[in-house]
Amino acid sequence: MFCTCGLAQGQNEAVVPQWEVTDYAAQDFLRYYRPTEIPDARGPKSSFWSWLSELDSARVAYRAESDYVTMALTAPARVEPAESAILQRAALTDITLINEAHHLPYHRTFTAGLLEDLYALGYRHLGLEALSFGYPLADSIANAPDPRIDAGFYGRDPEFGHLLREAQRIGFQVFGYDQPGRGKQPIRELGGMRNIMDYRAEHPDGKLLIHCGFAHAREGYYLAFNGGPLAQRLADTLSIDPLTVSQTSFSPGGVDEVSVLEPAYVPEADTASRFDLYVVHPEIQMDAGRPAYKFSNGREARRVVVNAPAGAGNDALLFVLSPTADESMGIPYDVVAIGEEREVTISAPAGSVRLLLYDGSKAWSFVTGGG
């Protein structure tokens, strides 16, 4: 279950790594940037910040990249707990679409927290916009025990990896559907719908959960999409009323827990199209210097003393990986930017993990004992 409550208290004794030099290699097109490198990096800086869980910097960067505007929750609005409201509605349809803001990883965390209950309702397939559709190995990478960062652009996000691992643990089949065509929305919407229909034809049993970005989950004939977003095209093609859930319409704040507006209504700004349910997230709490959602869904908080090895620079990244994952390609459980702070809290499942310290030119590795 998704929770923003403080969970990093009462951690075990801090791990003091005994580093050994490793042959980790940063990937040319799938690399992680240290904070000092991000301002000069090419690409969406908001995403680069988000993968380090630096949410304030991610929001600032996103405002420079996009004109997308969220609404504030008004005082008279009535709310109810989001999870129960979504599950109640999801039980009544065969397809549910829930969206995310690509620079806010906790949207993926929230979806991950719904999976177990959705599975109990008959959902068996998880379609992800973030997977690289058409890449021959993308779906097999996403369903592997150690998913890799080349599953898609957002494969570098630890919360995306958490979503994949939770889906696999519960029994979902994960697939990609997004049709390439950046800036050509009708092509993406139509192509995505056809790809989902093709997948559905091959996998007719079980309900579909589609996790997508922003307006793809809208219903109605949204002008910018020239024929309707993905959700509307699926509704028209299948003659079905999907459940559509927005996590991107409202700014965080004004609620104590993740909530939906009740009764469901169309906000004034959404007159051209709509979602069935609008999720409002609380302000993200910090715990031990990290976003508290990092410790949800069964993940533990552990302290690590970063006793940097000789020759390591002060500006480094600490990766937390499965001990069986490829050091250069595995999606990390967590990534922490290391500056002058030498004791940090990491997020990881129970058991041993591989810690990898990378200062931009050299790398060191250490596998912890079980925990």
Image (spheres, rainbow, N blue to C red):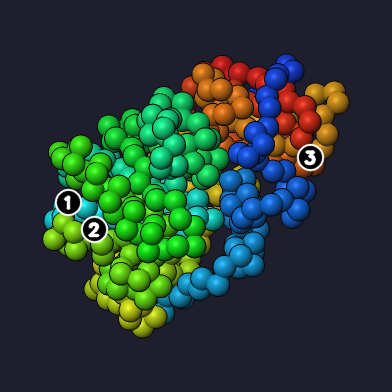
At 28% from the left and 51% from the top, the residue drawn is: 194
Can I make out residue 112 in this image? no
Q: Residues within 10 Å of mark 1 (few under 14, many from 20)?
A: some
Residue 30 appears at what percent x and percent y?
Answer: 61, 39
Q: Residues within 10 Å of mark 2 (few under 14, many from 20)?
A: many
At 28% from the left and 36% from the top, the residue drawn is: 172
- The answer to which quarter of the image holds residue 256 is bottom left
Q: Secondary structure at mark 1?
A: loop
Quarter of the N terminus within the rendering: top left
At 27% from the left and 48% from the top, the residue drawn is: 196
- The answer to which quarter of the image holds residue 214 is bottom left
Q: CA distance from mark 3 to mark 1?
A: 48 Å
Q: Amino acid at mark 1?
A: Asp
Q: Which mark is residue 15?
A: none
Q: CA distance from mark 2 to mark 1?
A: 11 Å
- Residue that carries the numbered disc 2 in the rendered image: 234
Report whether 10 appears left or right of 75. right
- Choose the circle earlier in sequence order: 3 or 2: 2
Q: Are marks 3 and 1 in contact (CB under 8 Å)?
A: no
Can I make out residue 175 in this image? yes
Report whether 280 appears left or right of 366. left
* Mark 3 or 1, closer to the camera: 1
